[in-house]
């Protein structure tokens, strides 16, 4: 979502960093570019004006203009102000000290509220909580069925009384049922409308009074840009929500909603939906998002994603195999599958410091179909062949190529490059950095994921 903004900001700050000394004119020029970049990203113009004023004031301080490396100081200031703009430190839900925690979901129809409800349920379930969902959207066709389907996939129980019951009574009944079953969390999925109206707000208010939620979360669609901020302002007056869930953050909108909503409403973004799958949902960390926008990467999120897929024992076992050069194609297949579970490869690249600023990375998509072909080749091998790929010759290669629907040359490339990779992994596991020429030779021969130019 932030690609265009990120590119503009990184280009502007790169120019600032290249200057050995900064003048007030240099700062003014940089602020103009930053202002234009934010406005083009559909950030609220009042927010842009206040943001650039703060950055300029700090940049014109004597500790910046008079420093040995003023360019780096400006980057640091922009990073800090971007973080503050999106809410500063990351926030979390408020949980009841004793008994059940109630979360009330609000939002317009089409904002992704029901899906966000299931995603939040899955996240809390993974954190060890017993979650129940209350189906209180009785107006939208198939809304209850949708919640039952996604709720079941998320590992939560769904309470519903059909589409003829009163939503306020459903919420009250569901709360009693959740307490009887000793659930830790009840998430109430309320009805949405195509636009804000008195009836919607009144129903939401009555559900709130009846259930006394610990958290009221507003789901806003990032694709609607500044309109999402207007929606948030309206709900802030009537629903008094506590935090925001930004949905569809993986879309191609310009990102103005995520950068404006905290400044306009005073309410923090708590979670972000980064894809269609239930596991593509994460806590929103303003400092990490600012780092991604400025091309600094997001190593902490990358580590957290990796830790979800690999246990400490598995990591130690992997390191041992690398050091002893006993890493097999079976191990390689397992690692590749674990990496793919972390999300689209392109998203992972964006979390690596500096990678977002590389032109070839920004202008390319990883062809994940190539990874499917690699997996098909390995699955067409016998267990013995995966453990001892050096025995794969002639007829074996033909059989594997036919079984995987690939060419013999592709099988040859995989076997050859796996051998080189295993040798390289041994060097690195033993603390030796590989020879750059060796890396160059590998990069020219590796059967790696193809890059599609946009």
Image: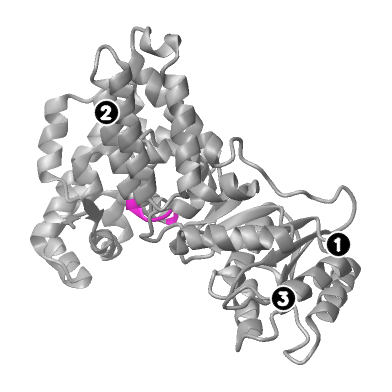
* Helix, strand or loop status at disc 3: helix
**Residue 198 badge:** 3
Estimate the x, y position of residue 98 in percent, counting from the top left: 90, 51
Closest to the camera, between mark 2 and mark 3, is 3
The quadrant of the rendering that contains the C terminus is bottom left
Estimate the x, y position of residue 64 in percent, counting from the top left: 40, 13
Neighbours of disc 2 within 10 Å: few (<14), some (14-19), many (20+): some
Say which residue appears at 25% left-offset and 55% top-offset.
365
Say which residue appears at 8% left-offset and 58% top-offset.
409
For this orientation, the residue located farthest to the bottom is: 164
How many marks can you see? 3
Residue pointed to by mark 1: 212
**Residue 42 badge:** none
Reply yes or no: does residue 414 show up in magenta. Answer: no
Say which residue appears at 42% left-offset and 25% top-offset.
56
Closer to us: 188 or 368: 188
**Is residue 180 left or right of 74 when viewed as pictured?**
right
Residue extent of the magenta highlight? 341-346
């Amino acid at each position: 979502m932030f690609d265009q903004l990120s590119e503009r900001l990184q280009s502007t700050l790169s120019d600032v960093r290249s200057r050995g000394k900064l003048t007030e004119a240099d700062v003014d020029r940089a602020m103009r570019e930053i202002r234009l970049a934010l406005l083009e990203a559909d950030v609220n113009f009042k927010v842009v004006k206040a943001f650039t004023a703060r950055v300029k004031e700090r940049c014109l301080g004597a500790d910046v203009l008079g420093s040995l490396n003023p360019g780096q100081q400006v980057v640091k200031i922009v990073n800090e102000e971007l973080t503050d703009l999106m809410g500063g430190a990351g926030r979390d839900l408020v949980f009841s000290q004793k008994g059940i925690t109630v979360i009330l979901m609000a939002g317009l129809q089409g904002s992704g509220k029901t899906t966000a409800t299931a995603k939040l349920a899955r996240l809390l379930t993974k954190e060890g909580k017993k979650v129940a969902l209350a189906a209180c959207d009785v107006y939208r066709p198939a809304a209850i069925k949708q919640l039952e389907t996604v709720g079941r996939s998320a590992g939560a129980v769904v309470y519903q009384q059909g589409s003829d019951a009163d939503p306020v009574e459903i919420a009250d009944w569901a709360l009693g049922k959740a307490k009887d079953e000793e659930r830790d969390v009840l998430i109430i999925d309320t009805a949405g409308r195509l636009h804000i109206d008195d009836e919607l707000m009144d129903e939401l208010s009555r559900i709130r009074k009846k259930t006394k939620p610990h958290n009221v979360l507003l789901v806003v669609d990032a694709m609607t840009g500044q309109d999402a901020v207007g929606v948030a302002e309206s709900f802030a007056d009537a629903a008094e929500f506590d935090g925001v869930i930004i949905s569809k953050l993986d879309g191609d909108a310009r990102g103005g909603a995520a950068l404006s909503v905290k400044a306009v409403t005073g309410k923090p973004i708590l979670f972000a939906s980064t894809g269609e799958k239930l596991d593509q949902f994460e806590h929103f960390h303003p400092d990490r998002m600012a780092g991604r926008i400025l091309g600094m990467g997001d190593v902490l999120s990358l580590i957290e994603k990796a830790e979800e897929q690999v246990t400490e024992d598995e990591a130690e076992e992997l390191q041992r195999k690398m050091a002893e050069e006993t890493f097999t194609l079976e191990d390689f297949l397992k690692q590749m599958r674990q990496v793919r579970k972390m999300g689209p490869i392109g998203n992972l690249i964006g979390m690596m410091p500096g990678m977002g600023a590389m032109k070839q990375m920004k202008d390319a998509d990883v062809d994940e179909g190539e990874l499917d072909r690699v997996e098909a080749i390995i699955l067409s091998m016998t267990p013995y062949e995966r453990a001892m790929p050096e025995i794969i010759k002639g007829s074996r290669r033909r059989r594997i190529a036919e079984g995987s629907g690939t060419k013999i040359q592709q099988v040859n490339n995989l076997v050859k490059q796996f051998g080189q990779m295993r040798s390289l992994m041994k060097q690195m596991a033993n603390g030796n950095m590989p020879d750059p020429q060796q890396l160059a030779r590998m990069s020219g021969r590796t059967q790696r994921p193809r890059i599609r130019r946009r």
